[in-house]
Image (cartoon, rainbow, N blue to C red):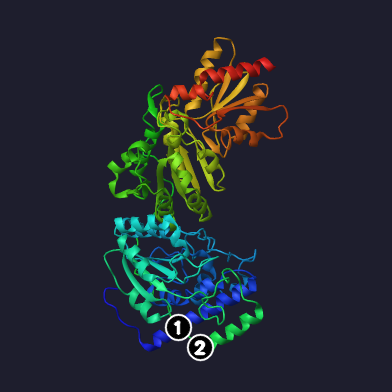
Amino acid sequence: MEGYHKPDQQKLQALKDTANRLRISSIQATTAAGSGHPTSCCSAAEIMAVLFFHTMRYKPLDPRNPHNDRFVLSKGHAAPILYAVWAEAGFLPEEELLNLRKITSDLDGHPVPKQVFTDVATGSLGQGLGAACGMAYTGKYFDKASYRVYCMMGDGELSEGSVWEAMAFASIYKLDNLIAILDINRLGQSDPTPLQHQVDVYQKRCEAFGWHTVIVDGHSVEELCKAFGQAKHQPTAIIAKTFKGRGISGIEDKEAWHGKPLPKNMADQIVQEIYSQIQSTKKILVTPPQEDAPLVDITNIRMPSPPSYKVGDKIATRKAYGQALAKLGRVNDRIIALDGDTKNSTFSEIFKKEHPDRFIECYIAEQNMVSVAVGCATRNRTVPFCSAFGAFFTRAFDQIRMAAISESNINFCGSHCGVSIGEDGPSQMALEDLAMFRSIPTATVFYPSDGVSTEKAVELAANTKGICFIRTSRPENAIIYNSNEDFQIKQAKVVLKSKDDQVTVIGAGVTLHEALAAADLLKKEKINIRVLDPFTIKPLDRNLILSSARATKGRILTVEDHYYEGGIGEAVSSALVGEPGITVSRLAVGEVPRSGKPAELLKMFGIDRDAIAQAVRDLVAKA
């Protein structure tokens, strides 16, 4: 790619013809569906034609081949033209395009990975470039391969801050294998975009972020070929001035046509007009990739040895997480860690010290960190672990939600959960994180309570498909499990029991230890309680919880360092709804907290040992 060779006139005409075929397919598909975004597709027709049939190197019948160049359609509403490309390349039957948006078809309204040619779901705007950064980082630093990553964005989404987080990331890490194409078609959904066609302003912004930037006529295949043919030692932004609805007479560059298909009679007329401009129906052969991406195996990743903790020793689960991650990194060089400038608090710094080449510092940009992890995980190239204060993942909830839609296998560790972090106060306290991650359909939610269970959670997460969340705490608590204890997803533990138990108390993390301390207080009063550690909050071990409840006169008390909404108490209540004779009482944080010492805060919000003991007494007294 170092030297640009101008295509001959025959090739240029073939690319123009291809662009027009893509236009026709997009118009026909959206008209047949009765919905969609034909005007957004038409502005990008030449860009897509040049990208897929001149610039990119890939195997059209094997879209997820690890050697292929990657493409991310960040403006996901232009999905019909992406589908048209893969029909033009021979992967999709052309007649399938007319099934766009039908429930019987995989061609959804926006790209999703059930389509083999789609690596990441898009459509929530502003996220594609971050995912592309993860793919490019993986290609340059982990795979050390020649594949390149292309990301096409719309100008409307450039108002999203996450785009500029990604722009900064790409520049910091010199991702010279990343090319962003900005489709500047002037019009948003309801209004013109703020800069409209001021391409020089876009250029200055991209250059300020450290990108090599080129302005082109986005409808000139020759200018596009030349722009894509320039290799630089920095990421490249191609600012393509285009017109929304290009080729649709009477609609091109007109407002109020976003997301509207053409009526059939209009579509038929426009298709005829565009078709008359096509000189040849001969299709362009795709150039295959250079095959230099290494083989990768991320299956069956196991700890090299059992946990080394001894019962009674004290360690914070956040530190146990860092030690476990570094340990797991020794057995597979595709375990990677990402952090947002909190590594000395989440203890992912232990991984960084041991495996510096596999640690990605994402700085204080949690949204982009999640998107980068999504990109790193595509095509099963890595097993990412993202670490941050649990509270700060809330700002990246949309990226996490889209990661699930992307069928991503990503692991999150949220430290500093609950009021037990103490003096830092409520802005740092994760009190909504269980609710957030439980709401994700593909999520597994781990809440380990000591060093042994934390290490087991890290190992299980690395081998579990979907989104995994590990909730860790700041206080140092005692090891309660032997190193040979077996842990499995959806398998709770009975930590304390007797034949005379009167209440089942369910706690996790800090509150599990408070429950054990409450048991000691109550034993002096000849009141025995059964203490359960759920280990995974989702999925929950319903059978063990139910059998324990029946053994303790149907009485359950949940206690958690989390708000009432969406946490352990609601998970247990949901699991047991409709079960006769079962009563669930709950202790949780009921209002916005404040700064204070951990013990003071646990007491203030009624989730410490004394509060647990009193709640048990009340339950027993009611009987």
Residue 530 visible here: yes
Can you name the residue that lies furthest to the right here?
A: 580
Q: CA distance from mark 1 to mark 2?
A: 9 Å
Residue 295 visible here: no
Label 1, secondary structure: give it: helix
Q: Quadrant of the C terminus?
A: top right
- Confirm or deny contact between disc 1 and disc 2 (CB under 8 A): yes
Q: Quadrant of residue 149?
A: bottom left
Q: Would residue 396 appear left or right of 204 to someone viewing this image? A: right
The earlier-in-sequence mark between 1 and 2 is 1
Q: Name the residue located 61 percent from the left edge and 30 percent from the top edge.
A: 545
Residue beneath disc 1: 16
Whole-percent x, y for residue 394 in the image: 48, 44
Q: Quadrant of the N terminus?
A: bottom left
Task: Give amino acid for label 1.
Answer: Lys
Whole-percent x, y for residue 72 in the image: 44, 64
Label 2, secondary structure: give it: loop
Whole-percent x, y for residue 421 in the image: 42, 30
Residue beneath disc 2: 277
Q: Quadrant of residue 2?
A: bottom left
Q: Would residue 105 appear left or right of 159 to someone viewing this image? A: right
Total numbered labels: 2
The crowd level at tag 1 (other Cα within 10 Å; few <14, some 14-19, many 20+) is many
Between residues 201 and 56, which one lies in front from this camera angle? 201
Q: Name the residue located 32 percent from the left edge and 62 percent from the top edge.
A: 145
In this rendering, is residue 465 above or below 224? above
The crowd level at tag 2 (other Cα within 10 Å; few <14, some 14-19, many 20+) is few
Task: Give amino acid for label 2.
Answer: Gln
In this rendering, is residue 619 above or below 269? above
Whole-percent x, y for residue 205 in the image: 35, 63
User: Which label number is shown at residue 533?
Assistant: none
